[in-house]
Amino acid sequence: MAAGQPLPSRAGGLLRAAGIGLGTGVAAVAYGALIERNAFMVRREQVACLPAGSAPLRVLHLSDIHLSLNQRKKTAWLQGLARLEPDLVVNTGDNLSHPEAIKPLLAALKPLLQVPGVFVPGSNDYFAPTPKNPFAYLLGPSRSHDDPGVKKIPRRLDTEAMHAGFDEAGWVNLTNRSASILLQGMRFDFSGVDDPHLQRERYAGWPAGTVGEHAAPSVRIALAHAPYQRVLNHFTAEEADLILAGHTHGGQLCVPGYGALVSNCDLPTKLARGLNDWEFEGHRSPVNVSAGIGTSRYAPIRFACRPEAVLLTLVAR
Ligand SMILES: [Fe+2]
């Protein structure tokens, strides 16, 4: 065909369609990386798990902050969350995405560290992220950093320094531990595990003994970073009144109108974000899975899956 002559109509149509497809893909990636990744929101839920006659209690659930350096929008948003006036903060891990991010993290959380809190770590609180294909997230669960098959040795993070910052503020470390806290005159029993994604969970059971005049708990709350089914089964069988977890990032790259394609663990994708009931051997526990606040440093994109904190209002049964 001579130069300057129009392409046959079928070939021209295909080229136009390819151009439109490519343009749409580029626009979607730009939107996910530049806009939705920073479109922070607060999801509000209600859980009827307090004794009859109790006043409501507000629990702010944070997860997967993945703070890196110079993340000013995320930092300002985190600092503003104290305006929600929570009675308790629950942090289910993956706070870090950079070895130098511990001080900025503690600064971002400073207003919330004035509030009673409990926490468990995620794998990204132990190991710095390593470069990878950002779309590998869609190909299946990430390899555990402890997995001998992982070729790149990740840099260890100063987890102890981060935990010391939380401890200093009075937040309670629930890494394979249990503890009781009195809130609004009610006894809350907590049981937490180290990250199940690293297969580090060891169950501490529920706290025993009397707290003040409280021999029995008002409510039992379980924490884990990664909501593997074996962990949800355990806490449900242990009659948790509420289970809180993160890790999934809500799927991170979702299909509008369909939802998550992956949960990064063995949790069904339809449960990758939100408050749902989990049933096991005749028991039932509500489980809140946070879609998280950040992303991996090497996959800085979200689509149809806004970053979130969750404000759970616990009310009387
Ligand atoms: Fe995470």
Image (cartoon, rainbow, N blue to C red):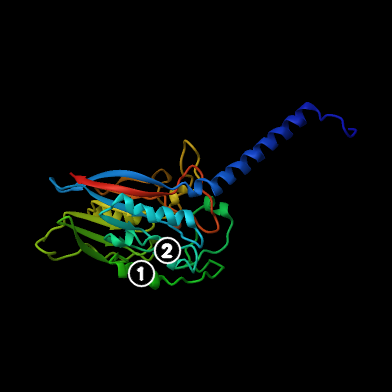
* Image coords of residue 31 (percent x, y): 56, 44
How many marks are shown on the rendered structure?
Answer: 2
Task: Kindly indicate whether the residue at mark 2 contacts the one at mark 1 (C-beta within 8 angstroms).
Answer: yes
Label 2 Cα crowd, 10 Å radius (few <14 / some 14-19 / many 20+): many
Disc 1 residue lies near ligand 1 with CB under 8 A: no
The residue depicted at 70 percent of the width and 37 percent of the height is: 19
Tell me the element at label 1.
helix
From the image, tell me which residue sits under label 1. 165
Question: Can residue 277 be seen here?
Answer: yes
From the image, tell me which residue sits under label 2. 105
The residue depicted at 61 percent of the width and 41 percent of the height is: 27
Pick whichever, 66 or 152, lies toward us.
Answer: 66
User: From the image, which quarter does the N terminus lie in?
Assistant: top right
Q: CA distance from mark 1 to mark 2?
A: 10 Å
In the displayed structure image, the side of residue 179 where residue 305 appears, left or right: right
The residue depicted at 51 percent of the width and 53 percent of the height is: 140
Q: Amino acid at mark 2?
A: Leu
Q: Amino acid at mark 1?
A: Gly
Pick whichever, 285 or 129, lies toward us.
Answer: 129
In the displayed structure image, the side of residue 254 where residue 114 appears, left or right: left
User: From the image, which quarter does the C terminus lie in?
Assistant: top left
Q: Quadrant of ligand 1?
A: bottom left
